[in-house]
Amino acid sequence: MSTSTTHELKHESLQLLREYQQTGSSEIRNRLVHLNFGLVRKEAHHWVNQCTESYEDLLQVGCLGLIRAVERFDTTKGSAFSSFAIPYIRGEIQHYLRDRGCSVRIPRRWLALRQQSVELIQELRVKLNRQPTDSEIALALEISLAEWQEIKLAHQNREPLSLDTPVGDAEEGTSSLGELVPDPRYRSFQLAQEDQIRLQQALALLEKRTRDVLEFVFLHDLTQKEVAERLDISVVTVSRRVKKGLDALKKFMSGAEH
């Protein structure tokens, strides 16, 4: 994209952002999303090779972040919209990946080798006219047999079995895995879900600016300095808001338990 085209795009976006602030028109918002869709594509390209989610899914999730950025951008602050929007897009994708990702963390190198092995196995199957052995796959990947077997095992066990998984047959009746393997920690999982619901309810009770600060710091992983610049407040104010918000959340949640 040429410099003049980029300048025109920024100018058009800024004009539309000003109009959107005044009107809240969904049509203008959609035009802004279309104009700045390249920001979403860039982030989706960055993350697609680091996860098992499809590129299309990442695009859709990133668009949610872009829409949120359009709705929150303040043209009077003087910051570039692209710089403002990228943390929202990235944060939405990261939040999605945290929710959808493997419970067992696999080294990035192993994920890359696993993806590489898919195409190699297809090529070896055609070449050998049979399913390749683990030794042949490891040789093609230029790694040891032991490492390839560890990669396979990690991929197979990337998600733990749910304790609610039914076991048994139809004649004898089914029961859950949690009932057959008593574990006091199972109750802690249920409590964690209840805590998450209480936390969401408590966040909704906070003052909007305090809630925004907590979201930027803890959900979007921004530093307090970055939050201060984005909200046009001092770092000291951000620090106070974080402390105030956390104290309020503790109070709300402890009160909900009684």
Image: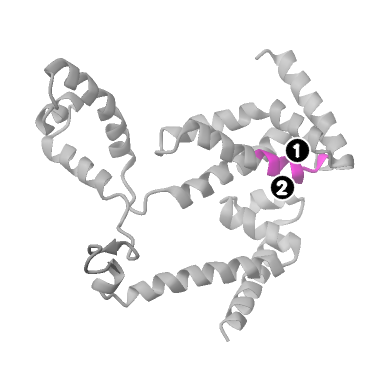
Mark 2 or mark 1, which is nearer the start of the sequence?
1
Marks counted in the figure total: 2
Residue 252 picture location, percent across and down: 64, 77
The image quarter in which residue 92 lies:
top right
Q: Main secondary structure of the magenta part?
A: helix
Vertical side of 203 occupied by 40: above or below: above
Q: Which residue is mark 2?
A: 230
Quadrant of the image for the N terminus? top right
Give the distance between the C-alpha atoms of the residues marked 1 and 2, in whole angstroms.
8 Å
On the image, numbered disc 1 is attached to which residue? 79
239 horizontally vs 43: left or right: right
Q: Is residue 73 magenta?
A: yes
Residue drawn 27% across and 44% down?
A: 155
Q: Position of residue 89 (x, y in %)?
A: 60, 40
- Residue 228: horizontal and vertical position, in percent? 70, 52
Residue 93, magenta (yes or no): no
Q: Quadrant of the C terminus?
A: bottom right
Q: Pointers 1 and 2 in contact (CB under 8 A)?
A: yes
Residue 135 in sight here: yes
**Part of the protein shown in magenta:** 66-75
Extreme-front residue of the structure: 171
Q: Amino acid at mark 2?
A: Arg
Badge 2 crowding class, 10 Å Cα cut-off, few under 14, some 14 to 19, many 20 or more, is some
Which residue is outermost to the right?
22
Residue located at (41% from left, 37% from top): 50
In-image side of 160 versus 61 (left or right): left
